[in-house]
Image (tube, rainbow, N blue to C red):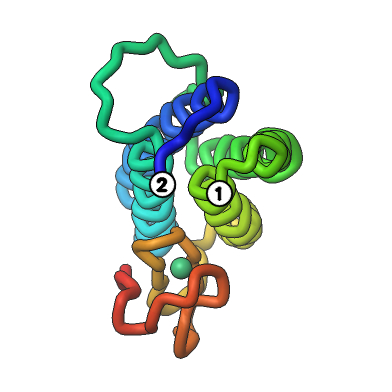
Amino acid sequence: MVVKNDMTADFLRSAYGGESMAHMRYLIWGDAAEKEGFPNIGRLFRAIAYAEQAHADNHFRELGDKKVDFSVTAGAVFGMGKTVQNLQGGIDGELHEIEQMYPVFLHTARFQEEKGAERAFHYALEAEKIHAQLFQEAQNAAKEGKDMEVGNIHVCPICGHTVADHLPDQCPVCGAKKEKYKTF
Ligand SMILES: [Fe+2]
Ligand SMILES: [Fe+2]
C-alpha cells in the first residue's frame, strides 16, 4: 500500500529521517559503551539500532516507488558523552516518539485512512515503549558503574518489537513467528 495524502506522506518522511538518525546514533553510542567497559549496553544499543532500521524501512516503503527529492525535517538527539548521558539521550528521544510524535502521526494516518502508514506508525510506537524501558534499566546499572545484566536481546525484523531473554512464540505486535527474530 502506498500513501496518498500529503500530510501523512510528510509524516512518513519525517519519521524515516528520525529513525535513520536514531539507527546511526545508537550504533555510535553502542561503540562508545563497549569502549567504556559496558559490552551488554553496547549490545542493547546495537539491537535497538536494528529495530529503528526496521521502522525506517517500513516508513520508506510506504512512500512508494516514485523518486522524488525532499528536504526532511526530523527530530534527533545530538551529543557524544559518557554512556549514562548517552542513555539519557536515548530515553529522551524514545519518550518524545512515544508521547508526542507517533501518537500524532498515528492519528493523522487513521484520519486520512492511510492503512499502510497507520500500521508502520503503530509498529514503531509499540517498539519505542519497550526501548525507553530498556534504556532506563541500562542507565540504572551504568549510574552505579555496572554493566546491564541482560541475556540475549531479540528483535522482530518486521515491526522492531524488542524483547530481552525470553523469546515469545510469535511477535505480540505483528504476529511474526519466533524464527524470524534477530538475536543480539
Ligand atoms: Fe526506539
Ligand atoms: Fe513483529
Q: Residue at x 52, y 43 (%)?
A: 117
Q: Residue flagged by tag 1: what amino acid is it?
A: Lys
Q: Where does the image place residue 35, in percent across and percent down from the top left?
A: 31, 47
Crowding at dot 1, Cα within 10 Å, few <14 / some 14-19 / many 20+, comes out as some
Q: Residue furthest bottom?
A: 169
In the image, residue 58 sits, relative to residue 166, either above or below, namely above
- CA–CA distance in space, label 1 to label 2: 8 Å
In the image, residue 25 sits, relative to residue 160, either above or below, namely above
Q: Quick check: 110 left or right of 72? A: right
Earlier in the chain: of badge 1 and badge 2, it is 2
Assign the C terminus to one quadrant of the image: bottom left
Q: Residue flagged by tag 2: what amino acid is it?
A: Met
Q: Where does the image place residue 77, in percent across and percent down from the top left?
A: 53, 26
Q: Which mark is residue 60?
A: none
Circle 1/circle 2 CB separation < 8 Å: yes
Q: Which mark is residue 1?
A: 2
Q: Residue at x 27, y 25 (%)?
A: 66
Q: Quick check: 157 left or right of 97? A: left
Crowding at dot 2, Cα within 10 Å, few <14 / some 14-19 / many 20+, comes out as few
In the image, residue 145 sits, relative to residue 78, either above or below, namely below
Q: Where does the image place residue 139, in percent across and percent down from the top left?
A: 60, 53
Foreground of the two, 9 or 155: 9
> Helix, strand, or loop for circle 2?
loop
Q: Quick check: 33 left or right of 132? A: left
Q: Which residue is mark 1?
A: 115
Q: Residue at x 61, y 51 (%)?
A: 125
Q: Is mark 1 within 8 Å of ligand 2?
A: no
